[in-house]
Image (cartoon, rainbow, N blue to C red):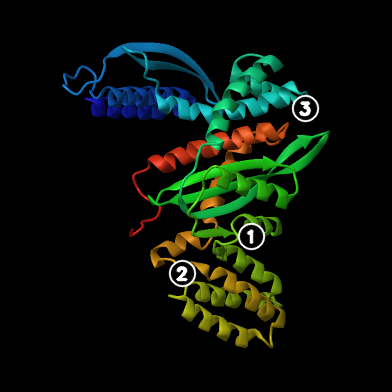
Amino acid sequence: MAQQLENRSIDDAVELLKTNGFDALADAVTVLLNSAMVAERSQYLGAAPYERCATRVSYANGFKDKTLKTRLGALELKVPQTRESEFYPQSLEKGLRSERALLLAIAEMYVQGVSTRRVKRIVEELCGMEVSSTQVSRAASELDELLNAWRTRPLGRYRYIILDAQYEKVRQGGQVLDAAVLIACGVGSDGKRDVLGISVSLSEAEVHWRQFLSSLKDRGLHGVELVTSDAHEGLAAARKAVFGGVPWQRCQFHLQQNAGQYVPSMNMRAVVAADIRAIFNAPDQEEAEHLLSKFLVRYRDSAPKLADWAEENLPQGFAVFNFPSTHRRRLRTTNLVERLNEEIRRRTRVARLFPNEASCLRLVTAIVMEIAEEWQTAEKRYLTFSD
């Protein structure tokens, strides 16, 4: 019965879009969200609507009307209720966190008087009313409590961690500055991905990285067998201070990019890139070192700076050879965090400029928290451990 209702709702949403195009997008999302909430209630109750079942834990108790302001407009939702009133659909809550964070980022810009007429119009369209500083402050406080609890949650054993950073524009003291957004992802013994932490700061890079990595250990992070990152100076110094005894894998993608600076002519670039890829794609470290030796001989005369650089730097990409061959592709680059950064940038682009660090941290936390929950609840594992 639940599956039939779900399929019918999807068909209804598709028909709305076919008939009215994108003008019906809000209505289609309303249909799908209402359907998802009903399906979630059925799962919570242990029984489909009107189903007689011995395993039922409670009973449905109608619906409560809720108007949700979103970027698509106002969605008129029917939130399912249960008799004991303990159920609340997470399919609604998850989507609201990042929406509220984005709304607050834009609203703060307006309230603090640093926005344009266009931002004011966006705020009024999203909120359905003009926004006061008191309303923004209250909403921010409620959301920050939830997000901070997630950022400071206890950690456990994560065998691999991947570190990277990106930058967002933040206003401070009448200036527009680049705020560093630091992200740590990990792979636990269950083989699933997780976002271990996130931090935003305008401080010096090494100080920021050291505080961030230390906070991960303070929250219980242990059992780390490999750290993958690029060779940023501040990150390198902090990593050595906090995870000094843990093997380091330098991102192979960044290494290949860095090599281009030492290639003396454009005509050589494609050949050099292919040779470096062959080294990194070697079946084991012994073969990789053999190919590196041939690389150094080949370019010692025609590109001496490249040869000197490669001799010192390319071995920093070999740590992954000490780990299972089935894990290497996932661990040899920072692609896991890079893709996460792309999603953050896609969704922060709407805000464009954050009024302060707290606003930036709020939105990026809401985004990565939502993604981390999807990773953790996914059936497919990121890696498989034999033990």
Local SS, label 3? loop
Q: Which residue is drawn at 44% across and 66% down?
A: 323
Q: Distance between the residues labelled 3 and 1?
A: 41 Å
Three-letter amino acid code at the position of disc 2: Asn
Q: Which residue is drawn at 58% across and 78% down?
A: 271
Q: Which residue is drawn at 68% across and 36% down?
A: 352
Three-letter amino acid code at the position of disc 1: Lys
Give the number of the mark in front: 3 or 1: 1
Judging depth in this view, the residue of 233 and 165 nearest the camera is 233
Judging depth in this view, the residue of 204 and 77 nearest the camera is 204
> In this rendering, would 357 be left or right of 16?
right
Local SS, label 2? helix
Residue 322's tag is: 2
Query: Of label 2 and label 3, which has the lower sequence position?
Result: 3
Q: Circle 1 is placed at which residue position?
A: 240
Q: Is residue 151 above or below residue 264?
A: above
Q: How far apart are marks 2 and 3 (CA)?
A: 52 Å
> In this rendering, would 254 be left or right of 203?
left
Q: Residues within 10 Å of mark 1 (few under 14, many from 20)?
A: some
- Dividing the picture into quarters, in which one does residue 375 lie? top left
Q: Where is residue 360 in the image (x, y as percent from the top left)?
A: 66, 35
Query: Of label 2 and label 1, which has the lower sequence position?
Result: 1
Query: Is the C-beta separation of discs 2 and 1 under 8 Å?
Result: no
Query: Of label 3 and label 1, which has the lower sequence position?
Result: 3
Q: Can residue 134 be seen in this view?
A: yes
Q: Circle 3 is placed at which residue position?
A: 114
